Image: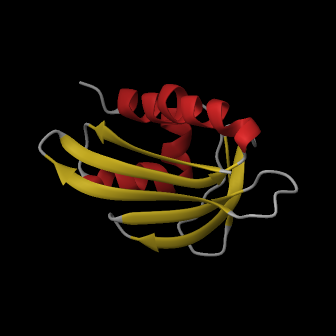
Amino acid sequence: MKDFKKYYIVGADPEMVYKALTNAATIQLWSGSPAIMEPDADTEFSLWEGSICGRNIEFIPFKKIVQEWYFGEQESVSIVTFLLHEDKKGCSVELRHTNIPEEDYENITIGWTEMYFASLIGFYAD
């Protein structure tokens, strides 16, 4: 199992970024795919037509989102944490993804940058 941590700058304030990560209709706008998401703990979510799915664990409005991501029969829980920080350019999103299966690590980390955050950053680009 491997861990991944990276910071991304999104050109919107933390409140807008939080809403973009927790509102199903807004997720669909920036991802281009229908989403299932409720900003409530212990709810299931699905993004990119089921390519990403899991369970929401914790929400601190405009500051923190914690999710469990599912990877088949994996014994250890894979946790994704988004920490939102104000930045002079908008919002600095600190991403922490723990317990990524070794065989999925490269695809997951590339996907974070080239798909997930590229789409979100592009949504708020000038």
Q: How many numbered discs sit on the rendered protein?
A: 0
Residue farthest toward the left in the current orientation of the protein: 88
Residue 43 occupies quadrant:
bottom right
Where is residue 27 shown, x and y percent of the image?
52, 44
Which quarter of the image is occupied by the C terminus? top left
Write the residue at 36% across / 51% down: 94
Left or right side of 8 for 118? right
Q: Is residue 77 visible?
A: yes
Write the residue at 29% across / 27% down: 125
Write the residue at 65% across / 75% down: 42
Q: How is the image coloured?
A: secondary structure
Task: Depth check: give the residue in front, 33 or 14.
Answer: 14
Where is residue 11 shown, x and y percent of the image?
25, 37
Q: Is residue 49 visible?
A: no
Left or right side of 82 for 91? left
Residue farthest toward the right in the current orientation of the protein: 73
Residue 70 occupies quadrant:
bottom right
Q: Is residue 108 above or below residue 73?
A: above
Residue 98 occupies quadrant:
bottom right
Left or right side of 26 for 123? left
Where is residue 56 shown, x and y percent of the image?
61, 66
Write the residue at 63% across / 31% down: 106
Q: Is residue 101 above or below residue 48?
A: below
Where is residue 36 shown, x and y percent of the image?
66, 53
Task: Depth check: give the residue in front, 104 or 46.
Answer: 104
